[in-house]
Amino acid sequence: MKNVLITGGTGFLGSHVIPLLPKESFTISAIVRTPGSYGSNVRAIVADLTNGQEMKNIKRTIDDTDILIHLAAAMPKASCTHEEQESLQEAQTQGLRHLLDVLHHKIKHIIYASSIDVFGVPRSLPIDETHPTEPITEYGKAKLQSETILREFCDERGCPLTILRITQIYGEGEPAIKAIPLFIRKIAAGEAPILFGDGSDERDYINVIDAARAIVCALEHKTNGTFVIASGTTVTLKTVVEDIVRISGKKLQPIYKERQKPKLNFRFDISKAKRELGFEAFIPLSQGLKIQYDAFLSATR
Protein backbone atom coordinates (compact mmCIF):
# COMPACT_ATOMS: atom_id res chain seq x y z
CA MET A 1 0.00 0.00 0.00
CA LYS A 2 1.15 3.55 -0.74
CA ASN A 3 1.11 6.35 1.81
CA VAL A 4 -0.87 9.47 0.91
CA LEU A 5 -0.35 12.76 2.73
CA ILE A 6 -3.06 15.39 2.33
CA THR A 7 -3.01 19.03 3.41
CA GLY A 8 -6.18 21.05 3.85
CA GLY A 9 -8.05 17.90 4.85
CA THR A 10 -10.50 19.81 7.04
CA GLY A 11 -11.21 22.41 4.34
CA PHE A 12 -14.15 22.65 1.96
CA LEU A 13 -12.54 20.54 -0.78
CA GLY A 14 -10.38 18.35 1.45
CA SER A 15 -13.30 17.19 3.59
CA HIS A 16 -14.90 15.81 0.42
CA VAL A 17 -11.70 14.30 -0.98
CA ILE A 18 -10.77 12.14 2.01
CA PRO A 19 -13.96 9.99 1.94
CA LEU A 20 -13.34 9.23 -1.75
CA LEU A 21 -9.76 8.00 -1.35
CA PRO A 22 -9.67 4.22 -1.78
CA LYS A 23 -8.71 2.92 1.67
CA GLU A 24 -7.86 -0.51 0.29
CA SER A 25 -5.05 0.97 -1.83
CA PHE A 26 -3.69 3.78 0.36
CA THR A 27 -2.92 4.66 3.94
CA ILE A 28 -3.95 8.26 4.53
CA SER A 29 -2.43 10.96 6.71
CA ALA A 30 -3.69 14.54 7.00
CA ILE A 31 -1.81 17.58 8.25
CA VAL A 32 -4.28 19.67 10.23
CA ARG A 33 -4.11 22.61 12.62
CA THR A 34 -6.60 20.97 14.94
CA PRO A 35 -7.57 17.27 15.04
CA GLY A 36 -10.55 16.40 12.86
CA SER A 37 -13.03 13.54 13.08
CA TYR A 38 -11.77 11.24 10.35
CA GLY A 39 -12.26 7.83 11.89
CA SER A 40 -9.63 5.13 12.21
CA ASN A 41 -8.70 5.17 8.50
CA VAL A 42 -6.96 8.56 8.61
CA ARG A 43 -3.97 9.57 10.71
CA ALA A 44 -4.29 13.23 11.79
CA ILE A 45 -0.97 15.05 12.13
CA VAL A 46 -1.35 18.32 14.01
CA ALA A 47 0.95 21.03 12.62
CA ASP A 48 0.76 24.47 11.02
CA LEU A 49 2.31 24.58 7.56
CA THR A 50 3.29 28.20 8.07
CA ASN A 51 5.30 27.33 11.19
CA GLY A 52 8.72 26.09 10.09
CA GLN A 53 9.61 24.56 13.46
CA GLU A 54 6.36 22.64 13.70
CA MET A 55 6.97 21.21 10.25
CA LYS A 56 10.49 20.14 11.21
CA ASN A 57 9.00 18.42 14.25
CA ILE A 58 6.80 16.17 12.06
CA LYS A 59 9.51 15.31 9.51
CA ARG A 60 9.92 11.75 10.77
CA THR A 61 6.16 11.29 10.98
CA ILE A 62 5.69 12.04 7.27
CA ASP A 63 8.94 10.49 6.06
CA ASP A 64 7.07 7.54 4.57
CA THR A 65 4.98 9.73 2.22
CA ASP A 66 4.66 8.37 -1.31
CA ILE A 67 2.03 10.80 -2.62
CA LEU A 68 1.26 14.37 -1.59
CA ILE A 69 -2.16 15.94 -2.23
CA HIS A 70 -1.73 19.63 -1.49
CA LEU A 71 -5.09 21.33 -0.99
CA ALA A 72 -4.31 23.78 1.82
CA ALA A 73 -5.05 27.38 0.88
CA ALA A 74 -6.32 30.62 2.37
CA MET A 75 -9.25 32.42 0.79
CA PRO A 76 -9.14 36.11 1.78
CA LYS A 77 -12.28 37.79 3.02
CA ALA A 78 -13.74 40.63 0.98
CA SER A 79 -12.92 43.02 3.83
CA CYS A 80 -9.18 42.23 3.72
CA THR A 81 -6.92 45.10 2.73
CA HIS A 82 -4.44 44.60 -0.10
CA GLU A 83 -1.62 44.36 2.43
CA GLU A 84 -3.50 41.74 4.45
CA GLN A 85 -4.13 39.71 1.31
CA GLU A 86 -0.46 39.89 0.36
CA SER A 87 0.58 38.76 3.85
CA LEU A 88 -1.95 35.93 3.87
CA GLN A 89 -0.86 34.55 0.52
CA GLU A 90 2.84 34.95 1.31
CA ALA A 91 2.27 32.82 4.40
CA GLN A 92 0.62 30.15 2.26
CA THR A 93 3.53 30.10 -0.17
CA GLN A 94 5.99 29.90 2.70
CA GLY A 95 3.97 27.07 4.16
CA LEU A 96 4.46 25.11 0.95
CA ARG A 97 8.20 25.69 1.14
CA HIS A 98 8.23 24.42 4.74
CA LEU A 99 6.36 21.31 3.65
CA LEU A 100 8.67 20.54 0.74
CA ASP A 101 11.70 21.04 2.99
CA VAL A 102 10.65 18.11 5.16
CA LEU A 103 9.31 15.75 2.49
CA HIS A 104 11.28 12.64 1.67
CA HIS A 105 13.29 13.04 -1.54
CA LYS A 106 11.84 9.77 -2.92
CA ILE A 107 8.25 11.03 -3.10
CA LYS A 108 6.53 9.47 -6.11
CA HIS A 109 3.71 11.88 -7.05
CA ILE A 110 2.34 15.31 -6.10
CA ILE A 111 -1.17 16.57 -6.84
CA TYR A 112 -1.77 20.29 -6.43
CA ALA A 113 -5.17 22.00 -6.31
CA SER A 114 -4.52 25.27 -8.11
CA SER A 115 -7.15 27.69 -9.39
CA ILE A 116 -8.44 29.37 -12.52
CA ASP A 117 -7.41 32.60 -10.79
CA VAL A 118 -3.94 32.03 -12.25
CA PHE A 119 -5.33 33.00 -15.69
CA GLY A 120 -6.44 36.49 -14.71
CA VAL A 121 -8.55 38.38 -17.26
CA PRO A 122 -9.51 36.02 -20.11
CA ARG A 123 -7.82 36.87 -23.40
CA SER A 124 -9.84 34.34 -25.36
CA LEU A 125 -12.62 31.83 -24.75
CA PRO A 126 -12.85 28.99 -24.05
CA ILE A 127 -9.86 28.92 -21.70
CA ASP A 128 -7.63 25.87 -21.87
CA GLU A 129 -4.25 24.92 -20.43
CA THR A 130 -2.37 27.05 -22.98
CA HIS A 131 -4.07 30.30 -21.95
CA PRO A 132 -1.60 32.91 -20.60
CA THR A 133 -1.27 33.14 -16.83
CA GLU A 134 -1.58 36.75 -15.69
CA PRO A 135 -3.26 36.65 -12.25
CA ILE A 136 -4.78 39.89 -10.97
CA THR A 137 -5.49 38.80 -7.38
CA GLU A 138 -3.04 38.01 -4.60
CA TYR A 139 -4.72 34.61 -4.30
CA GLY A 140 -4.10 33.89 -7.97
CA LYS A 141 -0.50 35.11 -7.76
CA ALA A 142 0.16 32.80 -4.79
CA LYS A 143 -1.37 29.85 -6.64
CA LEU A 144 0.82 30.49 -9.68
CA GLN A 145 3.92 30.92 -7.55
CA SER A 146 3.14 27.64 -5.79
CA GLU A 147 2.85 25.93 -9.18
CA THR A 148 6.36 27.17 -10.02
CA ILE A 149 7.78 26.05 -6.67
CA LEU A 150 6.29 22.58 -7.11
CA ARG A 151 7.52 22.25 -10.71
CA GLU A 152 11.07 23.04 -9.63
CA PHE A 153 10.84 20.56 -6.75
CA CYS A 154 9.43 17.78 -8.94
CA ASP A 155 11.79 18.43 -11.87
CA GLU A 156 14.78 18.02 -9.56
CA ARG A 157 13.48 14.65 -8.36
CA GLY A 158 11.90 13.30 -11.53
CA CYS A 159 8.59 13.22 -9.68
CA PRO A 160 5.26 13.49 -11.57
CA LEU A 161 3.31 16.64 -10.74
CA THR A 162 -0.39 16.97 -11.51
CA ILE A 163 -1.63 20.56 -11.36
CA LEU A 164 -5.40 20.99 -11.35
CA ARG A 165 -6.60 24.50 -12.16
CA ILE A 166 -10.06 24.28 -10.71
CA THR A 167 -12.93 26.61 -11.52
CA GLN A 168 -15.28 28.03 -8.86
CA ILE A 169 -16.31 25.24 -6.51
CA TYR A 170 -19.76 25.24 -4.91
CA GLY A 171 -21.72 22.82 -2.78
CA GLU A 172 -22.63 21.81 0.75
CA GLY A 173 -20.20 23.35 3.22
CA GLU A 174 -19.12 26.17 0.90
CA PRO A 175 -17.71 29.17 2.80
CA ALA A 176 -20.29 31.93 3.26
CA ILE A 177 -17.99 34.53 1.69
CA LYS A 178 -18.74 33.14 -1.78
CA ALA A 179 -21.56 34.21 -4.14
CA ILE A 180 -23.76 31.10 -4.13
CA PRO A 181 -24.04 30.69 -0.33
CA LEU A 182 -24.71 34.42 -0.04
CA PHE A 183 -27.51 34.12 -2.62
CA ILE A 184 -28.92 31.09 -0.78
CA ARG A 185 -28.83 32.79 2.60
CA LYS A 186 -30.63 35.86 1.30
CA ILE A 187 -33.27 33.97 -0.70
CA ALA A 188 -33.97 31.52 2.15
CA ALA A 189 -34.67 34.55 4.36
CA GLY A 190 -37.19 35.79 1.83
CA GLU A 191 -35.03 38.70 0.71
CA ALA A 192 -34.45 39.65 -2.91
CA PRO A 193 -30.94 38.71 -4.09
CA ILE A 194 -28.70 41.46 -5.42
CA LEU A 195 -26.99 41.32 -8.80
CA PHE A 196 -24.42 43.88 -9.87
CA GLY A 197 -24.79 44.71 -13.54
CA ASP A 198 -27.37 42.90 -15.68
CA GLY A 199 -26.52 39.40 -14.43
CA SER A 200 -25.23 38.25 -17.83
CA ASP A 201 -21.72 37.49 -16.50
CA GLU A 202 -20.78 33.94 -17.55
CA ARG A 203 -19.40 31.43 -15.08
CA ASP A 204 -18.62 27.73 -14.83
CA TYR A 205 -19.36 26.26 -11.40
CA ILE A 206 -18.24 22.77 -10.39
CA ASN A 207 -19.79 20.88 -7.51
CA VAL A 208 -17.39 20.07 -4.68
CA ILE A 209 -18.06 16.35 -5.09
CA ASP A 210 -17.02 16.51 -8.74
CA ALA A 211 -13.95 18.58 -7.82
CA ALA A 212 -13.04 15.92 -5.25
CA ARG A 213 -13.46 13.24 -7.91
CA ALA A 214 -10.96 15.12 -10.09
CA ILE A 215 -8.38 14.74 -7.31
CA VAL A 216 -9.03 11.00 -7.21
CA CYS A 217 -8.74 10.76 -11.02
CA ALA A 218 -5.37 12.50 -10.81
CA LEU A 219 -4.31 10.07 -8.08
CA GLU A 220 -5.28 7.06 -10.15
CA HIS A 221 -3.71 8.21 -13.44
CA LYS A 222 -0.50 9.69 -12.01
CA THR A 223 -0.26 11.97 -15.05
CA ASN A 224 2.40 14.67 -15.19
CA GLY A 225 0.88 17.91 -16.44
CA THR A 226 -1.52 20.80 -15.93
CA PHE A 227 -5.27 20.45 -16.32
CA VAL A 228 -8.29 22.75 -16.34
CA ILE A 229 -10.99 21.26 -14.09
CA ALA A 230 -14.48 22.62 -14.68
CA SER A 231 -17.99 21.39 -15.35
CA GLY A 232 -17.84 22.37 -19.00
CA THR A 233 -21.23 24.09 -18.69
CA THR A 234 -21.46 27.88 -18.80
CA VAL A 235 -24.23 29.72 -16.95
CA THR A 236 -24.98 33.35 -16.21
CA LEU A 237 -25.18 34.73 -12.69
CA LYS A 238 -28.79 35.62 -13.41
CA THR A 239 -29.53 31.97 -14.21
CA VAL A 240 -27.91 30.87 -10.94
CA VAL A 241 -30.08 33.27 -8.95
CA GLU A 242 -33.23 32.26 -10.83
CA ASP A 243 -32.51 28.58 -10.14
CA ILE A 244 -32.11 29.19 -6.41
CA VAL A 245 -35.34 31.24 -6.34
CA ARG A 246 -37.15 28.41 -8.14
CA ILE A 247 -35.76 25.84 -5.71
CA SER A 248 -36.86 27.98 -2.75
CA GLY A 249 -40.43 28.23 -4.03
CA LYS A 250 -40.46 31.91 -3.13
CA LYS A 251 -41.71 34.72 -5.35
CA LEU A 252 -38.65 36.94 -5.54
CA GLN A 253 -37.03 39.05 -8.21
CA PRO A 254 -33.37 40.05 -8.13
CA ILE A 255 -32.43 43.63 -7.41
CA TYR A 256 -30.02 45.04 -9.99
CA LYS A 257 -27.39 47.50 -8.86
CA GLU A 258 -24.62 49.37 -10.61
CA ARG A 259 -21.69 47.16 -11.49
CA GLN A 260 -18.74 47.52 -9.09
CA LYS A 261 -16.20 45.48 -11.07
CA PRO A 262 -15.54 45.06 -14.79
CA LYS A 263 -17.58 42.34 -16.45
CA LEU A 264 -15.63 39.12 -17.00
CA ASN A 265 -16.93 36.03 -18.78
CA PHE A 266 -15.45 32.56 -18.25
CA ARG A 267 -15.82 29.44 -20.38
CA PHE A 268 -13.49 26.45 -20.29
CA ASP A 269 -12.22 23.72 -22.56
CA ILE A 270 -12.03 20.57 -20.40
CA SER A 271 -11.10 18.12 -23.15
CA LYS A 272 -7.56 17.51 -21.86
CA ALA A 273 -8.77 16.46 -18.40
CA LYS A 274 -11.35 14.17 -19.96
CA ARG A 275 -8.82 12.63 -22.34
CA GLU A 276 -5.84 12.20 -20.00
CA LEU A 277 -7.42 11.92 -16.55
CA GLY A 278 -10.72 10.34 -17.50
CA PHE A 279 -12.48 13.14 -15.65
CA GLU A 280 -15.81 14.78 -16.36
CA ALA A 281 -18.32 16.39 -14.04
CA PHE A 282 -21.56 14.51 -13.36
CA ILE A 283 -23.60 16.78 -11.08
CA PRO A 284 -25.78 19.34 -12.95
CA LEU A 285 -25.82 22.81 -11.41
CA SER A 286 -29.57 22.71 -10.71
CA GLN A 287 -29.18 19.45 -8.77
CA GLY A 288 -26.15 20.70 -6.86
CA LEU A 289 -27.90 23.94 -5.94
CA LYS A 290 -30.91 22.07 -4.57
CA ILE A 291 -28.66 19.88 -2.41
CA GLN A 292 -26.86 22.96 -1.11
CA TYR A 293 -30.09 24.89 -0.49
CA ASP A 294 -31.70 21.96 1.38
CA ALA A 295 -28.53 21.50 3.46
CA PHE A 296 -28.58 25.18 4.41
CA LEU A 297 -32.22 24.94 5.52
CA SER A 298 -31.48 21.83 7.59
CA ALA A 299 -28.52 23.52 9.28
CA THR A 300 -30.56 26.59 10.23
CA ARG A 301 -33.56 24.80 11.67
Image (cartoon, helix red, strand yellow):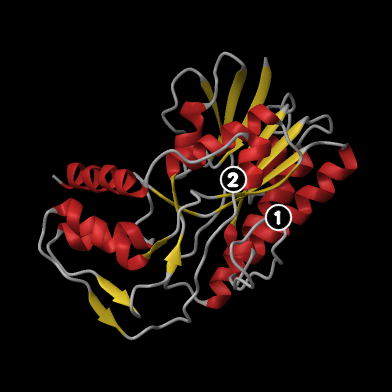
Q: Nearer the viewer, residue 271 or 230?
A: 271
Q: Residues within 10 Å of mark 2 (few under 14, many from 20)?
A: some
Which quarter of the figure has residue 94?
bottom right
Task: Name the amino acid type tagged 1.
Answer: Ser
Q: In which quarter of the image is the N terminus?
A: top right
- Total marks in image: 2
Q: Is residue 72 left or right of residue 19?
A: right
Residue 6: x and y in percent read 60, 35
Picture residue at 47% right of the left edge, 17% below the top: 40
Q: Nearer the viewer, residue 33 or 118?
A: 118
Q: Which mark is residue 111?
A: none
Task: Name the amino acid type tagged 2.
Answer: Asp
Q: Residue 146 carries which label?
A: 1
Picture residue at 49% right of the left edge, 27% below the top: 20
Q: Name the residue under label 2.
A: 48
**Considering the numbered disc 1 on the image, is that residue within a helix, a strand or a loop?**
helix
